[in-house]
Structures are given as C-alpha cells and as structure tokens.
Amino acid sequence: MTSALPLPPKLRWDDFIAAVRPRLAATAKFSLEEPLAAKTTIRIGGAARLYAEPGSAEDLRTLLIAAAAAGIAVFPLGRGSNLVIPDSGVDGLVISLAQESWATFEPRPDGRVWAGAGLRLKNLCGLAAKAGLTGFEFLEGIPGNLGGALRMNAGAMGGWMFDVVEAVQLITLAGEIRTVPRAAMHVDYRHCAELHAAIALGALLRPGSHADADAVSRQIDVYKKKRQESQPRDPSAGCIFKNPPGNSAGRLIDQTGLKGERVGDAEVSAVHANFIVNRGAATSADLVELVRRIRARVQAAHGIDLEPEVLLYGKNWSEVL
Ligand code: EPU
C-alpha cells in the first residue's frame, strides 16, 4: 500500500475549504487563518488554520464528516473562557456555535427548558429569572456558553452545570446525532467524558422550582457581588488550576507569596491567586512559564501537584510542563 505524500500545509487547508464550502449554507462562516485570541477571554494565542461557524446541525455534520475524511482534527470553541490558545495557533478546524440559531431558550409546558449550546450562560440565567425559574442563578458571571459549560461541567457558588441537566443532545465527530440522558453520562469535577469526542448541540434543563422573578434576580445579585469582590476583572481564563480535593488552589498559591508574580505580561492576579491575568500582550509561552513556576512553588511549599483546569488547545499540559 502506498500512502499519499503530505501536501504543503497551506495548500491542504485551502483545498479543504474549496471542497467543503459549496456544501454549506451561504450563511455559514468558513475561513482560513482566523485569529483566535480575541475569541478568548484571556486574549492570548495564534490563529486557527481553519475556522467555521455553522448555522445548523446539518452544516455542522457536513463539516465534521469532511474533516474526519481528510484526517483534520476538530476543536470545538465555546465562549473561550477556559481556554489558552498556543502562540503557534491550532492545526485543525475550529468550530464555533456563535450564530444566533444556536442560542435558543424554550420553556416547555412540563416545566423543563430546552436550551441551545450557543446560549450564553448570562442569557440563560437572565431568561430563567424572567420566567421565574430557579436553579440557574449560580451561572451568573461565568463567561461561557451552554456548550462549554457542559463540556467542563462548569461550577460556581456550590452549583454545577450537570445539577440542572436532564439530557444532552450531542453530535459525535463522525456526525452522528444522539440524545444522552444525564444518568448515562460520566460527569465529574470540571469534566464530562461524553463531550471529549463530541460537540454538544443543546440540553434539556430541569429548573428547581418556580419563584417570583424578583426573588431569582435578588439571588443573582448576591452572587454577582460575591464574584466581583473576589475575582479579577482583567482578562483571564478563569481559574487556572483545579482545586485539589478538600483544598483551594487560590489559597495554596496565595500562601506561597506568588500574587503579582509575572512572566512577560502574564501575572498572578493580586485579587485571586488562582487567576492569571493578561496585563496587555501576554503570550501563551509567558503563561506556560508562569504555570510552571506556580506549580514548582506550590509543590515545594505544600507537597501538592496542582493540575491545570484550563484547556491548552490542541496540546496536553503534560507535553509542555
Ligand atoms: N483564597 C485565598 N487567596 C486567594 C484566593 C482565595 O486565600 O488569592 C481563599 C478564599 O479566601 C477562600 C478560599 O480560598 O477561603 C476559596 O476561594 P473562593 O471562594 O474564591 O473559591 P475558589 O475555590 O478559589 C471556586 C471555583 C471558581 C468559582 C468560585 C466561586 C475552582 C478551581 N474554582 O473558586 O471557578 O467561580 O469557586 O464559587 O473550582 C473556574 O472554574 O474558572 C472558577 C473561577
């Protein structure tokens, strides 16, 4: 068997666009060398060799099947809040459900709510409050969308995304659409196994109970205030490390005196030590070096290996640390 010689990378990406573009709706965005830094909350990193914003499940399916056939890696992009893009960018197809068609919020007569993966958590929280639905208040201020929150089992203020999920509709990288009940999913702290090689399309959510809209809004305000007092406003990727069991990464880092430690423009936040903030022109190399330094200091002081929570797109942290 002879294997085809690899084409020069630029040509290969061009060829993929030329072959797939005619099979997508005109409204789908599809581009080469799309800068990604501005699509993340920490504003770091290079470009996607290929980038697509499909407007429908059909277009998403077409993209996934074509990428699989061409051997091109696929990277789902949520709101980019838990993500560091390497400076060299991403060798593959980045797919974002940023088009409005993915941001649905549909309360059902039985009290449950269908929400699209592209719905921002802030909007989910606000729409639920308006409808007098409780249970989503903890999502206030998490700068993500539903798809990313499912992928990471996002959590805050004692609540977890999967606390309010009944079922997730997903599409596998082979293009197969499935609805998986919560009970059949393997969900853990900042982790959902079923979404490692699949993209969430939306979820059936189960609100807690009905309350008057003002009461829900008041609870949201309490969380908002708490977050504003304890977390930095500068660009960041949220918490950098997972909390070790029974402990707090922020407190452990703080105790080593690392607040304000800086590599280039990446800095350990003075507000909360488990955040690295971008003071202007930080690179992913700066951030990785700072992560290395923090881990070494915490290991030396406390004998604990901190595990990164944020994803390093297209790489494993173990390769770079
Ligand atoms: N602390 C310090 N110094 C610091 C930061 C925190 O001493 O610089 C202490 C606090 O005083 C507190 C304890 O550490 O006693 C815990 O801090 P905090 O209440 O801020 O909670 P956290 O465990 O650091 C977690 C989540 C956050 C989430 C908050 C609020 C993780 C890794 N972090 O933070 O999630 O917003 O609770 O519920 O699970 C994220 O995942 O990106 C994230 C920001």
Image (cartoon, rainbow, N blue to C red):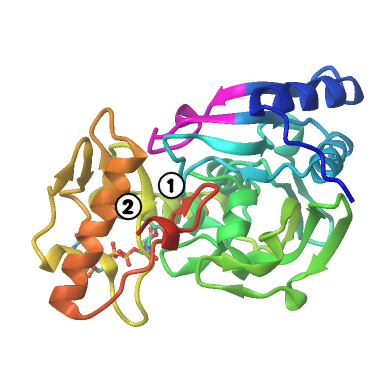
The reply to whether dot 1 and dot 2 touch (C-beta < 8 Å) is: yes
Position of 295 with respect to 9 (left or right) is left
Q: Which residue is mark 2?
A: 227
* Residue under the point 38% across and 38% down: 42
Q: Amino acid at mark 1?
A: Gly
- SS under mark 1: loop
Q: Amino acid at mark 2?
A: Arg
Let me know if residue 35 is in the magenta part.
yes
Vertical order, 179 against 95 (above or below): below
Q: Which quadrant does ligand 1 occupy?
A: bottom left
Disc 1 C-beta below 8 A from ligand 1: yes
Bounds of the magenta segment? 33-48
Which one is in front, 125 or 300? 300
Image vertical order of residue 155 relative to residue 313, above or below: below
Name the residue beneath numbered marker 1: 141
Q: Is mark 2 within 8 Å of ligand 1?
A: yes
Where does the image place residue 207, in percent across and percent down from the top left? 66, 63
Task: Say whether residue 81 is left or right of residue 166.
Answer: left
